[in-house]
Amino acid sequence: MGRYALLPGDPARVPVLASFLEGATEVASKREYATWAGRLDGELVAVTSTGIGCPSAAIAVEELATIGVDTVIRVGTAGGMQPETLPGDLVVASAAIRDEGTSRQYLPAEFPAVADLDVTVALTEAAAEAGVRHHVGVVHSKDSFYGQREPERMPVADELSARWRAWKAGGALCSEMEAAAIFVVATTLGLRAGGLMLVAGNQELSDAEPARDDQHVRMLAGTAVTGLRRLIARDRA
């Protein structure tokens, strides 16, 4: 499979990412995991979907590591949390809030979920090169989609709402469901990890139009591949 893997959540986005590689073909498909492989500037690259959430993402990273992958990049969508993270923007995750349970099976909650600096720099440069509005910073990783979207109907509504306000006040840029586990598992296994997210919507802005169309998804994919290309060149150097 080579050293590098791009990790979308949705299996349907695997062929989209793979279309940027040379000679990409399907390698495997099982449950939420679809894998294609192709070459980028001569380097073998895998594209593997992780499904929804941290448990399945952790399994994907574990099993890719066993076959030689040492660099993983989450490529997915997220919901904006700040007024400036607008639908259509990209977010490069420098770290993730561990508001989920999977990563606690690896390291205590006090240990930070941090992206690799080299991967983060490469993705940031790729976003700038593409001329896309982008942000770099902390993202929020959660287990419960509806707990975040509709906290008021949950028995622990007050707790959920208070924590959400705290994440926003702390400057979290967007909310998603996989980055924290990917970063912590990668750290535990000695891998490099990064994350690039498309802001698909922003529930904090009532007039924000969603950005989930094919054009935005291809922009996300192309930027991730450009970032990986930069990383490959630097690794060779």
Image (tube, grey):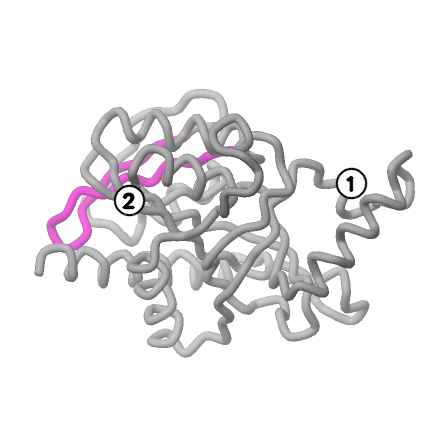
Point out residue 203 in the picture as x, y percentages from the top left corner. Answer: 76, 60
Point out residue 166 in the picture as x, y percentages from the top left corner. Answer: 74, 57
Q: Nearer the viewer, residue 43 or 105?
A: 105
At x 59% / y 49%, what residue is drawn? 97
- Mark 2 highlights which residue? 71
Point out residue 32 in the picture as x, y percentages from the top left corner. Answer: 49, 27
Q: Residue furthest left?
A: 237
At x 50% / y 75%, what residue is drawn? 133
Amino acid carrying mark 2 in the image: Thr
Residues in magenta, as a range: 34-51
Amino acid carrying mark 1 in the image: Gly
| Residue 190 magenta-highlighted | no
Disc 2 secondary structure class: strand
Distance between mark 1 and mark 2 Cα atoms: 31 Å
Decide: is 236 above or below 69.
Answer: below
| Residues packed near mark 1 inside 10 Å, few (<14), some (14 to 19) or many (20 plus) | some
The N terminus lies in quadrant? top left
Q: Nearer the viewer, residue 45 or 96?
A: 96
